[in-house]
Amino acid sequence: MALYLPYLESERIIKTHRKLCPKTNTPTPDARLAAPFALIEKVKGAMMLMAVDQEAAHLGLGPGMKLADARARVPDLQVFDHDLLTDAALLDQLADACLRYTPMVSVSPPHSLLLDISGCTHFFASETQLAQDTEDRFDQAGYSIFWALAGTPDAALALAHHRLREGAEAQLPVSALAMDDKIHRALERAGLYYIGDLVERPRAALVARFGSVLGLRLDRIMGIEDRPIDPIRRLANITVEQRFAEPLTHIDFAIHCLEELFAQAVQQLAERGQGARMIHMMLFRCDGDIARLAIETAPATRNIALFKRLLKERIGTLNDPLNPGFGYDLIRLSIVATDRLEHEQYRLEGGEDKQGNKAALISQLSVRLGRTQVQHFMPADSHIPEQGLLALPALDSGPPKLWDRPKSGEPPLRPLHMFDPPQHIQVLAEVPDGPPYRFTWRRKIHRVSRYEGPERIASEWWQRRNGQQPGKGGLTRDYYRVEDIRGRRYWLFRHGLYGSEKDNPDWYIHGLFA
């Protein structure tokens, strides 16, 4: 099914330029909207009409005309600035509203939507009734549409644009092929004005004269060849929904419905041996507004109690609280990402699921604070200290990786707190390539009482460059674990080998031990 909105831009202007009357508190249109109006944009130094309202279209105005010519025909023509990005965002918003009918919704800019309604008419008596319901909802929202049903997307779009119904493909003009204007004029000069005229002609002669693209477009309009549409949302692994004859006007009932829908999804997940990783929820209001909620869990889960806690956390963190307005008439829950999840076997004496508790805590904190605010460190394939670990969202925990652990009784090899980038310090050493005797950091002097090292870390040869700054590879580093006379421990390094790499190597502090 194709939906064509020929006056999308002008109807957006009408909706956005209505003002509330201070006495009656009712919307009143802008005085400029009482006359015909157009949306204009400067093109190559001339003001051009990009869109017009219905009244201006009936007076013979249309996109592509110069503003001066249009005002010569209609002197009282009003104008507004054309905003392409806002119109595109509005079309995307209307496409989202059509998700109540099918998950396969595609945008065909600048004025059309495509809906694959195969197998989606079980809530309606027929496809025509579904299309009529769509028209009624758009009309209530203040948008004029023309719809058409066909076997292929190209045929549906062509029929909707020319305001024809299914089965009238032969009556379409040759301009419905959406090819170059020169080809359209050449076809008309040859006496071929309609698609039906082309169908009656030998295909080989048409392709030889006008190219193979014409044959492809003709086959798509006539339903001989199909093409897939690109949906705006990725299809979910599992989708469950609930429709209501009487809209829900209380948030508590809507939350209870979401919990029941997740319980239904859990049954399907259990049959597949899977758990949910990403859960999307959509609450459709009667007036077309859509509330969206999303929950991501650290490991795959089928825990209904955990879902309830995360749902309450997610609702509590919304900047704009849920507002049912006139009520929700459709609530949908989709499992868009899953992982393998086997049944967990506990010991005979019982025990606590510590891993599950940790995962639940990570999920709850991530929902409350944001997925990027809760992180954990993962080892990386690099000997350079600040590049040897990655701070990743805790929700993206993959297979566990083991850190290198020091031997029993040995002090830690790496500090608890690491500076990135390392901080420059002034060091006094007995010999240029020896250990530090005293160093100055943040205007304070620290006298070294004990040290251990050096631990030499060479640069990554594929990134080595002369004079490269710390943290970027380059020079060799000699690390020392030092302790000052007050018992505080630091991690220092000399950047560059004395004499062979640098005449006067710099010193840096890279971390603090506990």
Image (cartoon, rainbow, N blue to C red):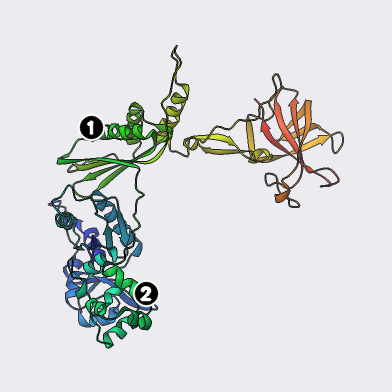
Residue positioned 32% across, 29% down in the render: 308
In the drawing, what numbered circle is on residue 482? none
- Residue receiving disc 1: 252
Three-letter code, disc 2:
Val
Within 10 Å of disc 1 (Cα), the crowding (few <14, some 14-19, many 20+) is few
In the drawing, what numbered circle is on residue 213? 2
> How far separated are the C-alphas under marks 2 and 1?
56 Å
Residue positioned 16% across, 52% down in the render: 22
Residue 80 appears anywhere in the view: no
The tally of labels here is 2
Label 1 residue SS: helix
- Residue 404 position within the rendered picture, expressed as x and y whole percent measured from the top left: 66, 30
Q: Is residue 470 left or right of residue 100?
A: right
Three-letter code, disc 1:
Asp
Front-lying residue, 462 or 454: 462
Front-lying residue, 410 or 315: 410
